[in-house]
Amino acid sequence: MSDPRAPLSNSLADTLAQDTTIVTAWSTMAVPAVVELLARAGYGAVTLDMQHGAHDIASVRDGIAAAVLGGAAALVRPPVDDFATVSRAFDLGAQGVIMPMVNSVDDALALVAAAKYPPLGARSWGPHRAAMLQGVTLDDYHRAANRAAVVFAMIETPAAVAALDDILAVEGLDGVFIGPADLSLTLSDGAEIAPGAERVQTLAGEVAAKARAAGKHAGIYTNSVEDARRAKAMGFQLIAHGSDAGIVLETAGRMARDLD
Ligand code: 3PY
Ligand code: MG
C-alpha cells in the first residue's frame, strides 16, 4: 500500500515553478462527476467557478475531491470581493484561487491576507479537509501552505491595468490572470464584448510580460483554440480553455449533425 501521507505528485505550485504551461478546464455546471471526467480527460487542472458558474460551497467541496480523484489540481474562482471564500476554498483542498475583479492594490492585499498564513497574510487555521485530500499531515500542510496555496488576481478592468505595477509588487501574490471578456467590455465602456480583439490581446501580452518580469505567473481565460495557442506563445503559463457546458454543446452539436 502506498504511504497515505505521501504528498500530491501534481502540485500546482510545483508545475508552475517548472515554467511549463498548464491548461485548466472550467467547471460551471457544478457537477462533481463532470469535474472528475474533465480531470480524467487529461486537463492538468479544473477551475470551479463560483462567480459566473453554479458552484456553491458544497459543490466546491465535492468538486475538489473529484478533481483529485481524476488526477488534476483544483482551482476555485470565488465571487467578486468574497475573500472569506478564498480561505474556505484552500481549507477544502483547492491548490489555487483565481480572484475576479482585483482592481486595486488594496484588493490584492485582501486576497493575499485571505490566502496565506502569517507572516505573509492572515489566513485562519483549519485546513483539515485539505490535508486529508492532499495526503499530508497538518504539520506538513502548514510548512508548505504559503507556497502551495497559489493565488492569481484577475486583471480585467482599466483600473486594474493602471494599478498593475503596485499589484505585482504585493508580496505573496503568485500571479495575475487576464479576463479578456470583461477587459473588452470595460475598455470599450460597455460597447462590446470582444475577448479576441487585437487591442485586448495586445494588452494581455503586455500584462503577461510585466508579470513575468516581476517574477509572477501569468494566466488567461481563452475562448478559442487559436486564442489558447496565442496565449501559450505569449508566455502565459496558466491557460483556461474549455468549459464543461461549452464542451457538451460543441461535442453534442457535432455528433447530432453527423447523424443528420
Ligand atoms: C473574463 O473574460 O472576463 C472572464 O472572467 C473569464 O471567465
Ligand atoms: Mg471576468
Image (cartoon, helix red, strand yellow):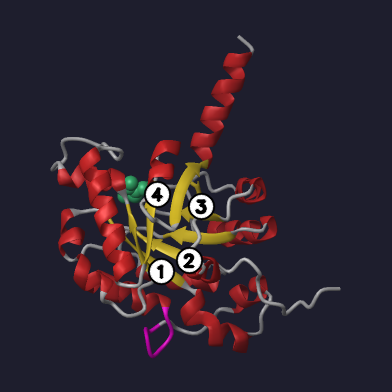
Q: Mark 3 is on which residue type?
A: Thr
SS label for mark 4: helix
Picture residue at 62% right of the left edge, 66% below the top:
10
- How crowded is the residue under tag 2: few (<14 C-alpha within 10 Å), some, or many (20+)? many
Q: Is residue 3 magenta?
A: no
Query: Disc 4 to disc 1, how far (Cα)?
Result: 23 Å
The reply to whether callout 2 and callout 1 are in contact (CB within 8 Å) is yes
| Disc 1: which residue | 151
Using the image, tell me which numbered label, if any, was put on residue 96.
2
* Residue named by callout 3: 24
On-image quarter of the N terminus? bottom right
Q: Secondary structure at mark 1?
A: strand
Instruction: Say whether disc 4 or disc 2 marks the residue closer to the N-terminus.
Output: 2
Residue 119 shown in magenta? yes
Amino acid type at circle 2 is Gly
Query: Does label 2 or label 1 sit earlier along the sequence?
Result: 2
Q: Nearer the viewer, mark 4 or mark 2?
A: 4
Counting every numbered tag in the picture gives: 4
Magenta stretch bounds:
116-122
| Dot 3 and dot 4 residues touching (CB under 8 Å) | no
Query: SS for tag 3?
Result: strand
Nearer the viewer's eye, disc 3 or disc 2?
3
